[in-house]
Image (cartoon, rainbow, N blue to C red):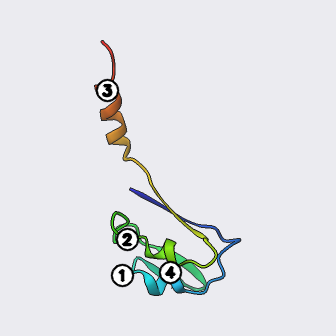
Amino acid sequence: MIEFKIFDELCTRCGKCIIACPTFALEDWFGEIQYSPNICEPDYCRACEDICPTHAIKLTLVPNTNEINEVESKNKII
């Protein structure tokens, strides 16, 4: 899962991230950038993060809680 964060205090609403996104995961909705996580491909693309002139976009991979629970249960000492 990807966590998408726009730092509003840095974002100038230039729209470069929207234009750069090849999957159209970003759109301008009445002056606010909207993100669609189901169509973003962060494993191979971080175009929005790379092109942002003010570094207002941060993409962070967040492990799935099911995966975390599996790893923890495998690492338990019985």
- The numbered mark, 1 or 3, whose residue comes first in the sequence reads 1
Give residue 52's position: percent from left, percent from top. Answer: 56, 77
Verify CB contact (< 8 Å) between mark 4 and mark 3.
no
Mark earlier in primary sequence (2, 3): 2
Left or right: where does residue 3 sit relative to residue 56?
left
Disc 2 from disc 3: Cα separation: 32 Å
Picture quadrant where residue 37 is located: bottom left
Residue named by callout 3: 73
If you read the primary sequence from the N terminus, does the residue marked by circle 4 or circle 1 appear first?
A: 4
Q: CA distance from mark 2 to mark 1?
A: 8 Å
Q: Position of residue 16 (x, y in %)?
A: 53, 85
Q: Secondary structure at mark 4?
A: helix
| Image point (36%, 81%), residue name | 22
Q: Nearer the viewer, mark 2 or mark 3?
A: 2
**Label 2, residues with CA under 10 Å away: few <14, some 14-19, many ≥20:** few
Q: To which residue does mark 4 refer?
A: 17
- Amino acid type, label 2: Cys
Dot 3 falls on a residue whose secondary structure is helix
Vertical order, 78 against 31 (above or below): above
- Determine the secondary structure under disc 2: loop
Taking the spot 44% from the left edge, 76% from the top edge, the residue there is 47
Dots 2 and 1: beta carbons under 8 Å?
A: yes
For the residues carrying marks 1 and 3, which lies nearer the camera in this image? Answer: 1
State the residue position of label 2.
45
Q: Is residue 26 left or right of residue 15?
A: left
Q: Is disc 1 surrounded by few (<14), some (14 to 19) or many (20+) residues within 10 Å?
A: some
**4 and 2 marks in contact (CB < 8 Å):** no
